[in-house]
Image (spheres, rainbow, N blue to C red):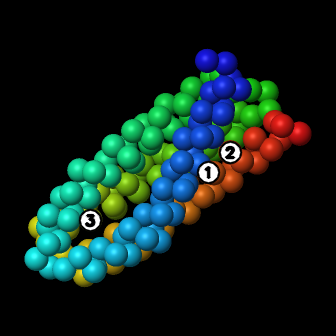
Amino acid sequence: MNGSALFVVNLIATWYMVGLIWMVQIVHYNMFDRVGLEQFQQYEADHNRLITPIVGVPMLFELATAVLLLFSAPDSFPRGAAIVGLALIGLIWLSTVVLQIPCHTQLLSGFDEAIYRRLVNSNWIRTGLWTVRGGLMAYYAFIAIR
C-alpha cells in the first residue's frame, strides 16, 4: 500500500473512532444509569461482548496504519505529525487499559454509581484525544488536497 492510500485508510479509521467515541460518550454511557439494578449485570456483560469488535478491531487497524505511516507516509504528512498521531493513540490506549477497562470490569459485578461516574468522566480523556487526532488527520488531508 502506498503512503497516500495508507494515510487515507488511517484517516478513515481515526474518524470512525471519533464518531464512535462521541456517540458512546454522549449517548451510550449516559444511559447506563437507566438500565435498572436487576438488569445491569447482564446489560454490562452484553455491552462488553457486543462493543469489543466494534471498538477493538478499528482501534487495532488505526494503530497498525499509524505505525506504518511512520515509515511510509506521503510527502504532505510530515514525520513529526505521524509521531504526534501515534503518541495520541498511545495515550488513548493507555486510558483505555488503565481507566475504562477496569471500570467496565468492576461494573460486571453490578451497577455502582461511583464507578459509573468514573467511567463517564474518564472517557472524556479518550473523547478529547481522538478529537484532537481527528483534527490533526483532517488538517493534513486538507493540506494534501490543496
Q: Quadrant of residue 78?
A: top right
Residue shown at 28% from the left, 51% from the top: 50
Using the rendered view, name the quadrant where residue 140 is placed: top right
Separation (CA) of disc 2 from disc 3: 30 Å
Could you tell me which secondary element the residue under label 1 belongs to? helix
Question: What amino acid is found at the position of numbered circle 3 in the picture?
Answer: Cys
Residue under circle 1?
133
Tell me whether circle 1 and circle 2 mark residues in contact (CB < 8 Å).
yes
Of residues 13 and 128, the one nearer the viewer is 13
Spatial CA distance of label 1 from label 2 is: 6 Å
Kind of residue at disc 1: Arg
Using a 10 Å C-alpha cutoff, classify the residue at mark 3 as few (fewer than 14 neighbours), some (14 to 19) or many (20 or more): many
- As helix, strand or loop, the secondary structure at mark 3 comes to helix
**Residue type indicated by callout 2:** Met
Quadrant of the image containing the N terminus: top right
- Report the side of 141 relative to 91 (left or right): right
> Of marks 2 and 3, which one's residue comes earlier in the chain?
3
Q: Are marks 2 and 3 in contact (CB under 8 Å)?
A: no
For image coordinates 54% across by 56% down, the residue present is: 19
Residue 116 in the image: above or below residue 145: below
Question: Which numbered tag is attached to residue 137?
Answer: 2
In the depicted structure, whether residue 97 falls above or below residue 104? above
User: From the viewer's perspective, is 24 left or right of 7?
Assistant: left
Q: Pointer 3: what residue?
A: 103
Q: Position of residue 136 (x, y in %)?
A: 69, 49
| Residue in view at x 57 percent, y 26 percent | 68
In the displayed structure, 59 sits above or below 106; it is above
